Image (spheres, rainbow, N blue to C red):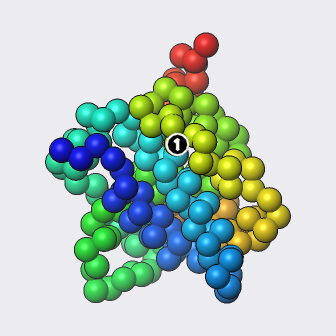
Amino acid sequence: MPTDLTSVIAASARWLLAAYPAPAGALSKALAEAQARQAVTLAAALRYPTGLDVQLLHLLGPSGAQRLDWVTGCDLYPDGDAWRTWVDETVVSWAACLLADCSLLALAYQALTATEHHAAASGLQRLINPNARDTDAAALLRHPDLLEGIATLYRAQLVELLTVDNAALP
């Protein structure tokens, strides 16, 4: 059984970038993609904190992108490309929360140490400390009002998880 989250991270980040695109230009797109991938990586690590959780995900499969398309009011890929089945709606919602809310992001970063994926913490700098160019490249991706429809889907569960996890930290 696979124990990595690569397919969920790739599909969920791709969905976020399609729904909230970067401005024109290769550098802007690359910077926005880096931030989306980092947010999704952190959200996926919190959602599936152990190898067993990841194995269950691969056995049962994620939720897919249909509800996210409905909430945003668009069908980004009407052909139903196969990668869309690996989009995890909870992970996307949590990533939206992290992109839009710095206080939740700080709590999530602390909670990452309690997961088996804590090695991912070293690669989250564009998400944690974005510079001006990062912020410009991800203007839509980090806009709280635009992300609200997606973020509200599972924000309560994320807040509860972070409150419980951070209370247990030394």
Classify mark 1: helix, strand or loop: helix
Q: Position of residue 133 (x, y in %)?
A: 79, 68
Q: Is residue 120 above or below residue 23?
A: above
Would you name the residue on which mark 1 appears?
120
Left or right of 15 in this view: 167: right
Q: Position of residue 108 (x, y in %)?
A: 58, 37
At x 75% / y 50%, what residue is drawn?
129
Q: Is residue 26 above or below residue 129?
A: below
| Location of residue 138 (image quadrant) | bottom right
Quarter of the image that includes the N terminus? top left
Q: Is residue 18 above or below residue 64?
A: below
Left or right of 85 in this view: 115: right
| Location of residue 48 (image quadrant) | top left
Amino acid type at image mark 1: Ala
At x 61% / y 60%, what residue is drawn?
35
Q: Position of residue 76 (x, y in %)?
A: 42, 81
Which residue is at the front of the view, 25 or 70? 25
Question: What is the residue that sits farthest to the top in this orientation?
Answer: 170
Residue density around tag 1, few if under 14, some if 14–19, many if 20 or more, within 10 Å: some
